[in-house]
Amino acid sequence: DKMNFSIELIEEQIPIDPSVRTACDLLGLDPLYSATEGKVIAIVSSEIAEELIIELRNIEASKDAAIIGEVVDYATSKLILKGGLGGKRILDKLTHDALPRIC
């Protein structure tokens, strides 16, 4: 079934550790498709989003919590990434297994 909405992520608002971004750049990987641990995305009402972020930032494990996008209705059933210059692209599902995290 199709959803009558999409999710639009704002690339520069996604908190990615600089060392992860550098490693991905060197290896030609997209950090949004790389395996990770300890991350969560919560879709909540805009009425409580700011308050939730404030509370999450008071917890050490979620000190980098951020609002990274919004639900939009100009497209259906898509995950859209909006870049810094305003360009947009659809984030497709992986067609292969993600690379495992190397600890």
Image (cartoon, rainbow, N blue to C red):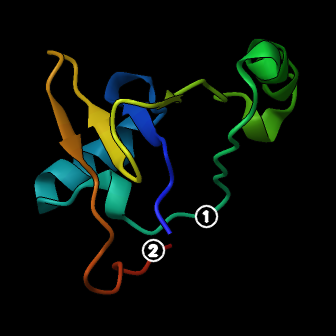
Q: Quadrant of residue 28?
A: bottom left
Query: Which residue carries the number 1 mark?
Result: 37
Where residue 100 sits: x, y (%)? 42, 81
- Looking at the rendered structure, the secondary structure element under dot 2 is loop
Q: Residue furthest bottom?
A: 97
Q: Are marks 2 and 1 in contact (CB under 8 Å)?
A: yes
Residue pictured at 74% horizontal, 36% vertical = 62
The disc at residue 73 is none
Where residue 15 sits: x, y (%)? 49, 32
Q: Quadrant of residue 45?
A: top right
Three-letter residue code for mark 2: Arg
Query: Which residue carries the number 2 mark?
Result: 101
Q: Is residue 5 above or below residue 65?
A: below
Alpha-carbon span between mark 2 and mark 1: 8 Å
Where residue 11 sits: x, y (%)? 33, 30
Q: Classify 10 Å Cα crowding around label 2: few (below 14), some (14-19), many (20 and above).
A: few
